[in-house]
Image (tube, rainbow, N blue to C red):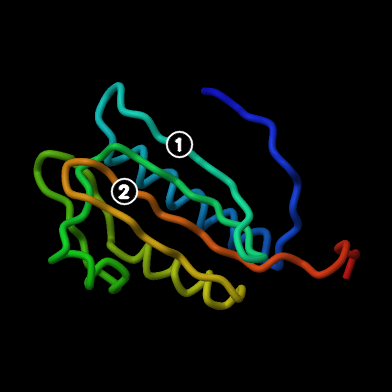
Amino acid sequence: MKLTECATWTVWADRQRLEQCLIKLLSNAIKYSRERDTVTVHCSLQQGRARLAVTDQGPGISPEQMPRLFQPFENFDDDQWETEDSGVGLAVTQRYMELMGGRIEVDSQPERGSTFTLVLPLTPAEPHDA
């Protein structure tokens, strides 16, 4: 694991829900990666929004599957990956992001991997206890 120092930003988000979204993306990236593949997390600031990107080198998502990606109970698992998944995680993640004023973006190429990015608004000022 390699950690790189970066700037600190504060976003408008429900801490527990944001944690669940990030864990879902990380667990998917790990689950669909093969031994010796790399999973990368990258944080950046773009147009006043924080971007948390999780990139894997897994099987990727075909253009035909992409429209169904965030549909509840859709599951693209095949025998090669031997995973059990209900198919609701990405649908819930997308909804949580919308409720926090953000969104989730996907860039994927079959056999090359995927990048899922959580995009959230920054806070206008320092956070407070409320």
| Total numbered labels placed on residues in the image | 2
- Is 4 or 84 nearer to us in this picture? 4
- Residue at which label 1 appears: 40
Badge 2 local density, few (<14 within 10 Å), some, or many (20+)? many
Q: Is residue 5 above or below residue 64?
A: above
Q: Secondary structure at mark 2?
A: strand
On the rendered structure, is 105 left or right of 41? left
- Residue at which label 2 appears: 114
Specify the farthest residue to the front.
47
- Is 19 or 112 nearer to us in this picture? 112
Residue at 46% across, 56% down: 117
Q: Is residue 91 above or below residue 20?
A: below
Label annotation for residue 57: none
- Is 92 or 37 nearer to us in this picture? 37
Asked whether the residues under the numbered discs 1 and 2 touch, taking CB atoms below 8 Å apart as contact, a structural biologist would say no
On the rendered structure, is 20 left or right of 113? right
Q: Is residue 90 above or below residue 55?
A: below
Question: Hey, which quadrant is residue 126 in on the image?
Answer: bottom right
